[in-house]
Image: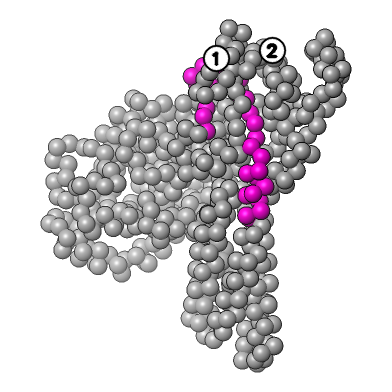
Amino acid sequence: MGFDSSIGMGAVAVGTRSPASVDRWQVYPRLAYTEPAEPAARRHWLAALGSTLLELPWLAWIAFDAMLVNLGVYLGYRVIAWGEGLEWLRLAWWQTGLIQSGAFLFASLIFGLYEQQALLRHSRILARSVLGTAASVILASIFIHLFLYEELSRRVLFMAGVFYLAVGPSLRLFVGWCVNSHSRKFVIVGTDRKSRLSLTSQDTRHGDALSRRYRLVGYIAMDSIEVGREIDDSRVLGTIDDLEQICIDHEIDEVVVGAGPARNPRVLDRVLGCLKLGCRVTNLATFYEQMMSEVPVVHLEPNWFLFADLKHYREAQLIMKRVFDLIGATIGLLLSLPFWPLIALLITIDSAGPVFYSQRRVGLNGRPFRLYKFRTMRQGAERNGHTWATEDDPRITRVGWYLRKTRLDELPQLWNILRGHMSVVGPRPERPEFVQELATKIRFYNERHLVKPGLSGWAQINYRYGASVDDARRKLQLDLWYLKHMSVELDLIILLRTLGTVFSGSR
C-alpha cells in the first residue's frame, strides 16, 4: 500500500564503462567527463516493470479491482440474460457492481490485500484475494437482501467473484514475480556497529521476501587497514576513495551511509559522486525505514527527531483524530454491548473473580490512567510481582485465552477512548513498572508517549505479542514509524486490519 511499505525503487544499477573512460576517470577523478552507465532497467526490465507496478498508489489498485469486479458483474448479467432474460432482475448491473465493488474494497482492506508487502509473496496474494472475494460476495448478498429488499441470483455475484479470481491475482502474481526476479545490490559506507545491517537476520513479518529483493554486497571502510575483513558474512570491499569504482565493478543499485560516516565531509564528497552513476544514495535509517516500514532505534541519532516532521502536534490532525475516536468508540460500543453479558457469563463460569480488570497504564506525555479490560487471568496472578505476559502464559484462563486471541478482552477500553485516555489507534499502553525498566534499556522509548496509546496500532498488527525487551524494541520501531506517518487514513487502515486479525485469531 502507498502509505505503509513504500520501498525506494527509484535507483537503477550501473553498468560498465569502457577502459578508456575508466582511465580518464582515474587520472582526473573530479574533472573528467564519463559516459553515463547503462541503466539496470535495460538489463533487468522485468524487475523495473515490477518495481513500477509495486509502487503504484493503493488507490490505483482499488480502481483496478473495482473495474474487474464491475466487469465480472456485467458478464454475469449477460450470461443470465442469454439463458433466462433480465425481466426479474430489477437492479441494474451497475448498481449491483457498485455494491459488490464496495463490499470487495471493504473486505480487502480488512484482509490486507492492498498492503505493498502482500505483493512480495504469492501465498499472501492468493489467500487474501480469495478471502476478500468470498467475504465481498457474502456482504453484497446480505446488503441487497436486507436494505434494498431485492432478490438477486447468487450466480451473478458468484460469477463476478470467479472472474476476479481468474484475472485480479494474476497481475499481482506477475508483479511479485518481476520484483523478485532481481535482487537490488547495495553497499554500506561504514564498518562500525551502528552501520551494520543484515536482512537475513531480521525477524520481520516479511524478512524472507526482503532478503530476496535486497542483497548486501559489502561494506566500505574509512581506512585501508580494514579492507578484506569479514563483517556479518559480508566483506569490506574497499575504502571510501574506491567507492565509485566499486559501484561500477559490482553494479551497485544503492549506496547506504551509516550514521557516523554521514557526518564526515570527505564521505559526503565521495558519496555524492555516485549519484551520476545512477545509484540511489541515502542514510541507513532512511533505507531501513523505507524497506521495513519501521524506524531503526539502534541506527537513530537525536537529530532524526528534528527532521522527521512528527505530526503529533498539529491541531487539525488532533481534532480529526479525536472525532474519529469518538465515532469509532461509539459504534464499537453499540455493536459489541449485546455480547458483553455473554462474555461476562463465560468468565464467571470459567474461574472465580471479577468480570472486569483494571490496571494503571502510561498515557499521553507519560501521564498514568486506569485501563479497563475483561479479566483473562486467574485471580491473584501477580501476587509475586509484575512479569511479562506470554502467549502461552499458564496464568491465563481457558476463556481468557480465546478472549486474548480474538482481542475481545480489550472491548472495555472503548470506555477509555470515550473518556479521552486512549485513542482508537496508537502505541500499546504499557504499565508504569515496565516503562521505567524499558526506558533505561531502550533509547527514545519515552518518545512513544507523544501520542495517546491506542486500542490497536501499527505495532499491534505487524508484530507478535511482546514479552521481552527485544520485543519492546521492535514494537517501538513500529510505533515511531506510526508517529511519523500518522493520519486519519492510516488509522482507518489499521482499524480495518485489526478486524482481519480478529477474524484470523492472531494477536
Q: Residue 212 or 2: which is nearer the viewer? A: 212
Q: Residue 343 or 55: which is nearer the viewer? A: 55
What's the amino acid at mark 2? Answer: Asp
Residue at 66 percent across and 43 percent down: it is 181
Q: Label 1 vs label 2: CA separation?
A: 17 Å
Residue at 38 percent across and 27 percent down: it is 442
Residue 469, by quadrant, is: top left
Q: Alpha-carbon neighbours of circle 1 within 10 Å: few (<14), some, or many (≥20)?
A: few
Callout 2: helix, strand or loop? helix
Q: Which residues are magenta?
A: 172-199
Residue 54 image position (x, y, % from top left): 65, 48
Q: Residue furthest top?
A: 225
Residue 192 image position (x, y, % from top left): 51, 16
Residue 330 image position (x, y, % from top left): 39, 61
| Residue 182 magenta-highlighted | yes
Residue 85, by quadrant, is: bottom right
Q: Label 2 belongs to which residue?
A: 241
Q: Which mark is residue 449?
A: none
Left or right relative to 323: residue 8: right
Q: Is residue 293 visible?
A: no
Q: Is residue 119 visible?
A: yes
Callout 1: helix, strand or loop? loop
What's the amino acid at mark 1? Answer: Arg
Residue at 44 percent across and 37 percent down: it is 203
Q: Residue 214 or 276: which is nearer the viewer? A: 214
Q: Label 1 belongs to which residue?
A: 229
Q: Disc count in the image?
A: 2
Q: Residue 87 or 132: which is nearer the viewer? A: 132
Residue at 62 percent across and 83 percent down: it is 91
| Residue 192 magenta-highlighted | yes
Q: Alpha-carbon neighbours of circle 2 within 10 Å: few (<14), some, or many (≥20)?
A: some
| As drawn, 184 above or below 409 | above
